[in-house]
Structure formats: C-alpha cells, structure tokens
Image (cartoon, grey):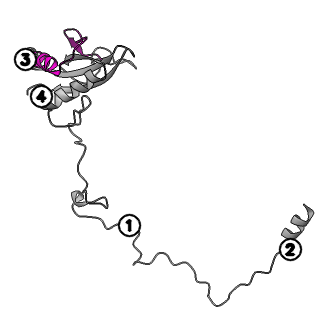
C-alpha cells in the first residue's frame, strides 16, 4: 500500500509547447453552422428521412373521442375486424352512445367530477357473442335510433371485470 502511494506522489514533468500562441476567444465564426437554416414553408421541413413533417393537431377543433377517432370513419369490414379481435380475446362486446361524446362539466364544477364519463348502454352487453355480424347489426340499429349521438363499441373482460377495448364507430350526422 505504501509503494502505491509513493509512486503516485512522483509525477513526470509536463512539457508545455509554446509554438501555439494563446488567442482570446472571439466567438463562433460565421461559417460554423450549428443550426439548420430556417425554412420559409413550415410544411417543407423534413426529419432527415424520406418522410416529411405533417400537421398532426388541428388547434381549433382538436376533440378526440375514443381510440381510433383520429382516423377517417371505419368501414363495416374494419369494424368487424376490431369486433373479431374483441371476441377472440373472450371479451363481451357492448355498444354505448352519447350525444356529447366527450368528458365535460355541466352539472357540477368541483374537482374530480365530470359529466360524460359514462355513456348510455345500448341494450345489454352481448354476452356469449361469437359473430361480428350481430354486433354490426346492433351498431346500425343504435345509429338509426340515435342519429345525433356518438356510438362506440367496448370489449369487457368478465375475468378481469374491466373494459379492455373501446373504439368509436359513428359520429353524429351534422
């Protein structure tokens, strides 16, 4: 231990080169470009790959209601595939509707209370459903009965006692 500390105490002299004169720092040169030049067209900005930047948020009507609501309206075939996924996982499809379609505060403005958290259930959950076509028929019937409402499909797990899937299938006709 003593030999280690003794060898650390002795150091070789450092040779300083005087061939490079010390100059005062005068700032960055104008040719050094650390930032990309600003584009005139903000949509012309790219992210370094072949994909260009695109507008993802509309700041004026930015309401998103449920999963997949940012997509164009789903076709019956796409809805059937989502319902098949719910059925394959052993979940029970359920159809709900609501006129507002989002969480809001109408009756009470206290903390933690929101209206619109729970939607109105269309009939009962479809316990034991094995056919997506039956769910599509119920969606069409609900949409016909309530044309001014949002309609969504949920998948409930009887084992976990929770909602495991949910997506919007219809927005109100304007």
> Could you tell which of marks 4 and 1 lies nearer the N-terminus?
1
> CA separation, marks 4 and 3?
15 Å
> Could you tell which of marks 1 and 3 lies nearer the N-terminus?
1
Residue lying at the far right in this picture: please name it.
2
Helix, strand or loop at disc 1?
loop
* Residue 130 falls within the magenta-colored stretch: yes
Answer yes or no: do the residues labelled 3 and 2 have beta carbons within 8 Å? Answer: no
**Disc 1: which residue:** 35
- 153, 110: nearer the viewer: 153
**Disc 4: which residue:** 76
Helix, strand or loop at disc 2?
loop
- 55, 6: nearer the viewer: 6
> CA separation, marks 4 and 2?
83 Å
- Nearer to us of marks 1 and 2 is 2
Position of residue 89 measured from the top left corner of the image (x, y, whole percent): 31, 23
> Could you tell which of marks 3 and 2 lies nearer the N-terminus?
2
58 in relation to 99, above or below:
below
> CA separation, marks 3 and 2?
92 Å
Answer yes or no: do the residues labelled 4 and 3 have beta carbons within 8 Å? Answer: no
Would you identify the image quadrant in which residue 132 lies?
Answer: top left
Residue lying at the far bottom in this picture: please name it.
19
Residue lying at the far top in this picture: please name it.
124
Q: Residue at x 21, y 22 (%)?
A: 152
> CA separation, marks 1 and 3?
56 Å
């Amino acid at each position: 231990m003593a030999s280690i500390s003794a060898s650390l105490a002795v150091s070789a002299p450092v040779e300083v080169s005087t061939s490079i004169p010390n100059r005062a720092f005068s700032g960055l040169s104008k040719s050094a470009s650390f930032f990309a030049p600003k584009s005139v067209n903000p949509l012309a900005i790219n992210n370094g790959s072949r994909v260009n930047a695109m507008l993802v948020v509309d700041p004026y009507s930015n309401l998103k209601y449920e999963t997949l609501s940012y997509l164009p309206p789903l076709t019956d075939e796409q809805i059937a595939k989502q319902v098949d996924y719910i059925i394959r996982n052993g979940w029970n499809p359920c159809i709900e509707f609501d006129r507002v379609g989002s969480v809001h505060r109408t009756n009470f403005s206290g903390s933690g209370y929101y209206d619109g958290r729970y939607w109105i259930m269309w009939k009962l959950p479809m316990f034991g459903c094995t056919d997506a076509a039956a769910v599509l028929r119920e969606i069409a019937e609900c949409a016909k009965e309530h044309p001014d409402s949002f309609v969504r499909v949920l998948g409930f797990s009887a084992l976990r006692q929770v909602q495991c899937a949910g997506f919007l299938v219809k927005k109100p006709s304007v």
